[in-house]
Image (tube, rainbow, N blue to C red):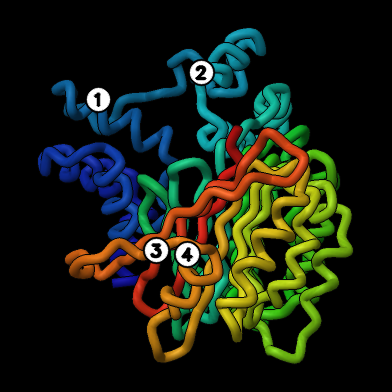
Amino acid sequence: MEASSEVLKQNPYYIKASIYYEVLQKKPIFDSYRNFCDTVGKDAMEYPDFEFWYYRFYHGSRDFDYDRSADPEQKTLVDIPVVVMKKIANYLDPVERTRLRTMNHAIKNVADSFPPVFEKIQVMVSDWSMSWTLNNQQFLCKNERRGCSLIKPNCPTETSEEYYIKKGLEYLAPVLKMPNIQVKHFSFRLLCDETLTPNDLLPVPFNPKSAFIHCRSTNKVVQFLTAITPGHLESLGVDVSSAERRENYGIIYETDQFKQAKHVDFKPISGLNVRGLAIFSHLKKFKCHLRSNNAFEDIPTIRDTISAFEELKSCELSFYSGLTRFPMRGIDDALGEEIPIGPIPENGHRTITHRYRIPDSNECLKFEIKEEQYQCIVKIIKVR
């Protein structure tokens, strides 16, 4: 096969005959070019030349000996006036513009004149793959027995002998480090023991409005968290539930990013102690998992603690109670409420509602406590 391909490449007539054959198959030109490259060789002819002969044959010309030297020089993308290129770039979305900037230096400068704005960027790294989402377009780089495979939207799968994370970073890091990049939500999940650092991926400064970070160690969470500009970060989600229990996740609270956030969703290793709720006193909204050994004592403690949070608008707390149902009877006794008499609803959820007037205030805390099999969800809203 290799020998026959070399013979074809050395004979222009055979090459044009191969293109004519592709035209007769009535396939789209891009599919025809890929098949041509697989048959003759990737270096047999550049795409612009293939396109010229393809469309000549497609429109009925069969002159294999046509002399192109008398034709006007073909214009390329870089010959387009800068004003026109800017208009083209302006109509592209941020993901399309990232592809445009990889074509050459001149086009890169035009693309970079438009600040890239992303609604969301999500990155996940596991033991077998690296995936990322730019707005709604998904990319995947998978570990293979020999190298990796890269899947991009509307593109054929690309194979490489490189390590899958290194290959993925070659595509993703330049996007995240584009000048003046703006990101509304950034999500990063490092679900393996890779030694990735923020320098491998993130720009300086990095200013998302909201962020979610999930790593297998608290130190790694803090490493990526502190790479985000505090003050710009309003909403923060942190998951260290897969970290080792002996780790101190209290170092997360010491970061400026946590202290200056307005909304926090925090999933600690084994749940916070109820008396640790004070760390959320500066927030407008938060979600957290708590551990409770005595619901009768802990629920009033939660109520009294949260009633002193001046900035609070709402929060959601979850408790797990091991292998038994959460003691709803103990909670209703502690709050002075009664669980409605009657059969348990079909969904198996029993709910307690409770209102508590905050001392020396016109505001109340509205509690909705719902039993969900082995956990209890407490939603609290501050109302007037």
Q: Nearer the viewer, residue 193 or 241?
A: 241
Mark 1 burial class by Cα count in 10 Å: few <14, some 14-19, many 20+? some
First-in-chain label (2 vs 4): 2
First-in-chain label (3 vs 4): 3
Mark 3 burial class by Cα count in 10 Å: few <14, some 14-19, many 20+? some
The amino acid on which the numbered mark 1 sits, given as a three-letter code, is Arg
Mark 2 burial class by Cα count in 10 Å: few <14, some 14-19, many 20+? few
Residue at image position (50%, 41%) is: 135
Q: In front of the other: label 2 or label 1?
A: 2
Q: Quadrant of the C terminus?
A: top right
First-in-chain label (1 vs 3): 1
Q: Secondary structure at mark 3?
A: loop
Residue indicated by mark 2: 91
Q: CA distance from mark 3 to mark 4?
A: 17 Å
Q: Is residue 233 visible?
A: no
Residue at image position (44%, 51%) is: 138
Q: Secondary structure at mark 4?
A: strand
